[in-house]
Amino acid sequence: MRLNAKTIFRWSFSLLAMVLLAPPSVPAADIGNCLLCHKYPGLSRIDEDGRLRLLFINEATMNSSVHARVKCEDCHTDIKKIPHDPAKKVDCLTQCHIVEPTSEQKFSHKEVARFLSKSVHGLKDRDQKPKKHPEDLPSCKDCHDNPLYRPLSIFKQKVHPGISKAALGRCRVCHKKDEFIYRFYNHVTTRLHKIRSPKNIAEICARCHDDAQLAARHGLSTKAVYSYGETFHGKAALFLDERVPDCLDCHVNPGRSVHQMLSYKDSNAITNENNKGLICANMDCHPGASPKLAEYRVHPEFDLERNPYQFYAQVFFLGMTGSVLLPIMGLLFLDLLRRMFPNASLRRRK
Amino acid sequence: MATQPLIKIKDGKKYFYRFSAIQRAQHITIASSVIVLALTGMPLKFPDAPWAPSLYALFGGIKMAPIIHKTAGTILFLLFVFHLFYIARSIYTDLVVPLRRKNQLSAVAVLKGILTHPIMPSFRDVRDFAAYLKYLLFLSDKPPEGAKFTWKEKFDYWAPFWGIVVMVGSGFIMWHKELVTRYVSGEIINFALIAHSDEALLATLFLFIWHFYNVHFSTSVFPMGTVFITGYLPEHLMVEEHYDYYRQVMKEAGLEDEILPPPGSRREPVAAEMPAAAPSAASRESLVGGEEA
């Protein structure tokens, strides 16, 4: 084949058409073609503080996350050109281009921030006075990453992780785009249960609540999550049981979100002395239980001042264990020794 | 039920009757339920231990293991109730009925009979323990000449009475917390957890160290004692642990001339290897059985 101008034009046109008409391999949200660079696993740099920053975006993971539909530049608003300068930290309160369907307004997390400001984790106390050590109080990214969808399949009363093909079939009756169907299915069923396991949630809370110095600064009981781990709930959580309550199940008022958690001193808090009887007795946990069940100490600590009776009970059993086991271990050792020298004795029988 | 001979002779060796079939069945039930309880409970006691997840997974993990644990606990509780009935029945048939036949039935006589039963703790146990301690410390070359039940066996028998009451009681509180907290404060669950968890550790270590050493791993018994299966104890163990009772049984069987020297005598031939003579008198038939009897 001779390469003349016509042939070159035909080939160029064909290649251009292939590039333009090929199905996009990037997510719909990657309008700015950010994955052109960020799809490479080795993409990283050393920042000004000498820390290695991994800049790789796993496309499949990103597409399975709750932010899959949000355009990169909606959060990274300071990036205007490619290649770009080092990006600033994302502000979660930025208004993004997702439209909230009930209000038809562009979505932002400002409402969540408003909830948080009135909660026990807000920067001001109930009298609207600034709290001490505001740097200790959590902001969005202290607790949240970009969580993945955890869809549920619900079919004939059986619930298991995944997507129900039977349900999808019904969705397709009205909705034509599979991309929308999958996203909506994921969005709804992920929120029918918890994205994080109780173990994972306890680990997040432990970052602050098991920090003895931070807890002392705020007058909190030390090692709240450690003590939860001493209960059956905490132990089952360690074995990845998702049926047991985590911190939020007891500390957040029913029908509210974690961002609206109240101090136990607040008379409206479910953890308040006058209300906590309702915590355990809800339908999902111990239906019909007496309010006395909630008198169970979820944060027992081996502490004479805080839990004197439990302290003495523990000491009694520890003492009994030691006073039985140590002597029998001694006897056992002596018995083994004696068997090595059966005829030896300081006094011989006549 | 046919009476078992007190001495069986097999391959020229004597074996002494210790436990009936019903007693052995009870022992196997308690042993297997306690082993299952320990294996399904210890991962919860030590959830951070590296072995805990794998061991728990063997029993079906957090969804299945608690069900197995509660089933084994229920079996243990039912066995305990059965054993109490078994004791009551034994007192009636072995104590009350003979006393009534002799026209000597009274509360004092029954109480006296119970308190003097060989399994009841007695002053002799203190004496035997002191003698054992002296022997272990090389202050004596004579170990105690044990009775039918030694102080070790009585300890092994009576300790689970406390243990089972604590374990079953605390386990019941935690299992049926909704019912229990209708009447008492939920704080009782904290105490139940402490008792259940700590008593379990004590019982497990006690059984797997002390009891297993005495009945399986000591140099006289290793690699495994078989009395819990056969109901019969070999002669050399009978001499070592129950010499007083051994002498009594041998005399009752008319085998005085075959009584071995007491434990602590200079070990010449191992007692178990000494050939046993066949019984000679017809009166021994009910006491001596086996292929050569």
Image: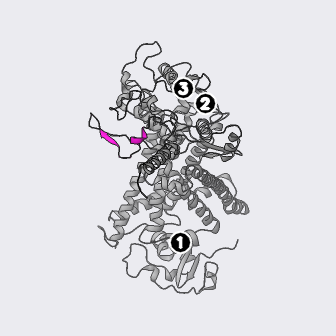
Residue A304 percent coordinates (x, y) = 42, 32
Q: A48 or A306, which lies in front?
A: A48
The three-letter code of the residue at mark 1 reads Thr
Identified at 56% across, 57% down, the residue is: B36
Residue A292's tag is 2
Vertical relation: A188 (above or below) B3: above
Task: Name the residue tied to disc 3.
Answer: A271
Q: A315 or A141, which lies in front?
A: A141
Q: Point out the image quarter for the C terminus of chain A.
A: bottom left
Q: Secondary structure at mark 1?
A: loop
How busy is the neighbourhood of tag 1: few (under 14 within 10 Å), some, or many (20 plus)? some
Task: Name the residue tied to disc 1.
Answer: B226
Residue B164 shows in this picture:
yes
Give the main secondary structure, helix, strand or loop, of the magenta stretch.
loop
In magenta segment, residue A44: yes
Chain letter of the residue beneath label 3 in the structure image: A
Identified at 50% across, 82% down, the residue is: B258
Q: Nearer the viewer, mark 3 or mark 1?
A: 3
How busy is the neighbourhood of tag 2: few (under 14 within 10 Å), some, or many (20 plus)? many
The boundaries of the magenta stretch are A32-50
